Image (cartoon, grey):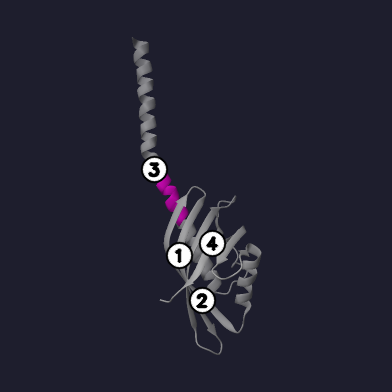
Amino acid sequence: MRMKRARVGAFTAGVLALLMSAAYAPAARADSTTAAGDEIRAELEKWTRDFNSGDASEVCSLFAPDLISNYRGEPEDTYTSLCANLQMALADTAKTYHYDLEIKEIIVSGDLAVVRLVWTLKVRPKNGPEETKRELGLDIFRRQPDGSWKIARYMAYEAPYP
């Protein structure tokens, strides 16, 4: 009888441990997705600061090497072509560019995340009125081997302002 109680006790302890781990698993997942969302938000905010300050050396750091991007009405971009375009814009002395970021939603699942956002781009020519464009987008981030989050795919389009 003593052996039977020991087995029942071990079984009960095992079931209790399983139930407790299942109860805490959603909280652990929620904590990790919240942390990932915070990391992604920080990366987007850093990119905004880098771009607005004209830091051409950092302006490509948000994007994964295998990036594919689509902007309505434009040819598909890769990491190389997008970075060249961004660096060319920052080197343009005839205009200044300024982005404002509005994050609508971040959804994280494992090593992928989807971000709905709006970029407001202000382009100010040296001799002319400022133009404002509102660009709605959907970015797909992928966790990189070093643990960082980078945009692997994105789609964007210009929307009427405001």
Q: Give the range drawn in magenta.
A: 29-37
**Residue position marked by numbered label 1 in the rendering:** 117
Three-letter amino acid code at the position of disc 1: Leu
Q: Between residues 17 and 71, which one lies in front from this camera angle?
A: 71
Image-based side of 5 in relation to 129, left or right: left
According to the image, label 4 marks what residue? Answer: 154
Q: Distance between the residues labelled 3 and 1?
A: 27 Å
In front here: 162 or 144? 162
Q: Where is residue 122 in the image (x, y as percent from the top left)?
A: 49, 78
Q: In this view, does 43 lie to the left or right of 11?
A: right
Q: Which residue is drawn at 49% across and 47% down?
A: 110
Frontmost residue, 73 versus 2 = 73
- Classed neighbour count for the residue bearing mark 2: other residues with Cα under 10 Å, few (<14), some (14–19), many (≥20): some
Residue 71 included in the magenta stretch of the image: no
Q: Mark 3 Cα within 10 Å, few/some/many (few <14, many 20+)?
A: few
Element at label 1: strand
Which residue is label 2 attached to?
98
The three-letter amino acid code for the residue at tag 3 is Pro
The label nearer to you, 3 versus 1, is 1
Would residue 2 be found to the left or right of residue 159 on screen? left
Alpha-carbon span between mark 3 and mark 4: 29 Å
The residue at the point 44 percent across, 75 percent down is 160
In the displayed structure, 96 sits above or below 111; it is below
Q: Which of 158 and 33 is in front in this view?
A: 158
